[in-house]
């Protein structure tokens, strides 16, 4: 078995990424088979429980309130609505529901209490529960863990250097701090990023350095291809080449052997053959469903046909880690503290973001 390393350098990762394609594919596939069943893929369903109106300045995101996109904002879903969606996802083969809210960070109060009840409800359906809610404190992480949360997603998005060219309202260190807060519980970490935002290959390697040097490494790493949305600062970026996606998946697999590497946003732009090569290179997780928060995703039936053609089987829930026990709200040891953490706001100006913001004001 390959030893897990936490001291990868950017130069080493660039050397792997730039290997002759067939050599890279073979090495990644070999590592993948040492640590995973190559014919099993974990299937997650991503559900936007609170859509739009986000105060953040993330250049790729159509949910940012400062940009003019076609995203309609919705208030927080009810527990019953979420339960119905979870049951639907389970019936089509998903083992995990990931709930996303367009928040900068979690705030103690009625809405967070409602999310905790959603976590309890889905965990009782014998499904893994993941949340992506923005920055969280250690106490909030403990409250989610008590409710039965299986995983928390908080993407690094890119390298620390290029991050500043995409986002002006969140600090990279705050993302790392959120991951560290999650690590103080029994909740697993899901963290990855996006390629195709205009970054260099060195930035892709830098992101993999940041992820692979975490100890322990994230249990799940989503690799997203940018879905360029009209009205956002990155609307004119060209689609990512499938070869770049395969190289990114393969490199992630080699440097993070035990991690589940997820094909996330951008699959609608990939052929079945391209996705098959990603699976061969070490991807063993996907998001299913017709939407990823607000962007398109392949139809569930199309995914089922692809799985059948490739001989792939959906991974059963709690294969990698035992199911968390749900603690009811009345028995919780961790109560709301009304915290007001000082998450950073760099607020530097990103030219293309400023242009998109001004255009939005004109259109509105």
Image: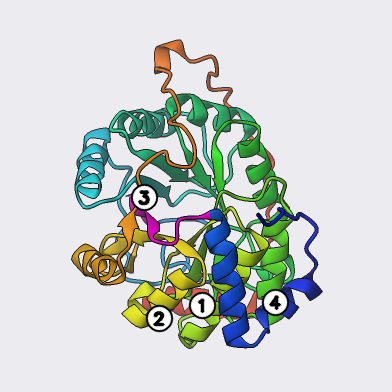
Residue beneath the point at 67% across and 84% down:
19
Res. 9 image quadrant: bottom right
Secondary structure of residue under mark 2: helix
Which residue bears the numbered disc 3?
315
The part of the chain drawn in magenta is 36-52
Secondary structure of residue under mark 3: loop
Q: CA distance from mark 4 to mark 3?
A: 28 Å
The answer to whether 326 is drawn above or below residue 214 in the figure is: above
The answer to whether 165 is drawn above or below residue 141 in the figure is: below
Q: CA distance from mark 4 to mark 2?
A: 20 Å
Q: Position of residue 246 (x, y in %)?
A: 51, 78
**216 left or right of 222 in image:** right
Residue 71 sits inside the magenta stretch: no
Mark carried by residue 274: 2
The residue mark sitting in front, 2 or 1, is 2
User: In this rendering, does residue 259 appear at all?
Assistant: yes
Among the two numbered marks 3 and 1 on one chain, the one whose residue lies closer to the N terminus: 1
**215 left or right of 271 in image:** right
Kindly indicate whether the residue at mark 1 contacts the one at mark 2 (C-beta within 8 angstroms).
Answer: yes
Q: CA distance from mark 2 to mark 3?
A: 21 Å
Kindly indicate whether the residue at mark 2 contacts the one at mark 4 (C-beta within 8 angstroms).
Answer: no
Kindly indicate whether the residue at mark 3 contacts the one at mark 4 (C-beta within 8 angstroms).
Answer: no
Which residue bears the numbered disc 4?
16
Which residue bears the numbered disc 1?
245
């Amino acid at each position: 078995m390959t030893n897990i390393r936490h001291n990868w350098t950017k130069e080493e990762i660039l050397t792997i990424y730039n290997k002759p394609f067939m050599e890279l594919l073979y090495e990644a596939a070999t590592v993948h088979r040492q640590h995973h069943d190559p014919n099993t893929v974990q299937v997650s369903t991503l559900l936007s429980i609170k859509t739009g109106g986000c105060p953040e300045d993330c250049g790729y995101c159509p949910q940012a309130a400062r940009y003019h996109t076609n995203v309609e904002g919705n208030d927080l879903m009810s527990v019953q609505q979420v339960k119905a969606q979870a049951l639907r996802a389970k019936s089509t083969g998903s083992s995990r529901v990931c709930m996303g809210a367009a928040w900068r960070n979690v705030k103690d109060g009625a809405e967070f209490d409602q999310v905790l009840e959603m976590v309890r409800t889905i965990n009782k359906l014998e499904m893994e529960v993941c949340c992506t809610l923005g920055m969280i404190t250690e106490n909030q992480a403990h409250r989610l863990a008590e409710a039965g949360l299986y995983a928390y997603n908080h993407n690094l998005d890119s390298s620390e250097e290029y991050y500043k060219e995409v986002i002006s309202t969140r600090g990279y260190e705050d993302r790392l701090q959120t991951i560290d807060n999650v690590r103080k519980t029994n909740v697993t970490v899901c963290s990855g990023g996006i390629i195709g935002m205009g970054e260099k290959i060195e930035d892709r390697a830098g992101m993999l350095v940041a992820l692979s040097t975490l100890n322990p490494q994230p249990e799940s790493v989503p690799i997203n291809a940018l879905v360029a949305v009209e009205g956002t600062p990155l609307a004119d970026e060209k689609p990512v080449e499938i070869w770049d996606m395969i190289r990114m998946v393969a490199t992630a697999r080699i440097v993070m052997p035990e991690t589940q590497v997820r094909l996330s946003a951008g699959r609608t732009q990939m052929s079945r053959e391209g996705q098959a090569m990603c699976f061969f290179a070490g991807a063993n997780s996907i998001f299913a469903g017709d939407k990823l928060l607000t962007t398109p995703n392949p139809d569930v039936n199309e995914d089922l046909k692809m799985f059948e053609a490739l001989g792939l089987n959906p991974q059963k829930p709690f294969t990698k880690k035992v199911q968390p026990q749900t603690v009811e709200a009345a028995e919780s040891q961790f109560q709301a503290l009304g915290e007001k953490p000082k998450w950073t706001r760099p607020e530097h100006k990103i030219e293309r973001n400023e242009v998109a913001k001004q255009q939005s004001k004109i259109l509105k």
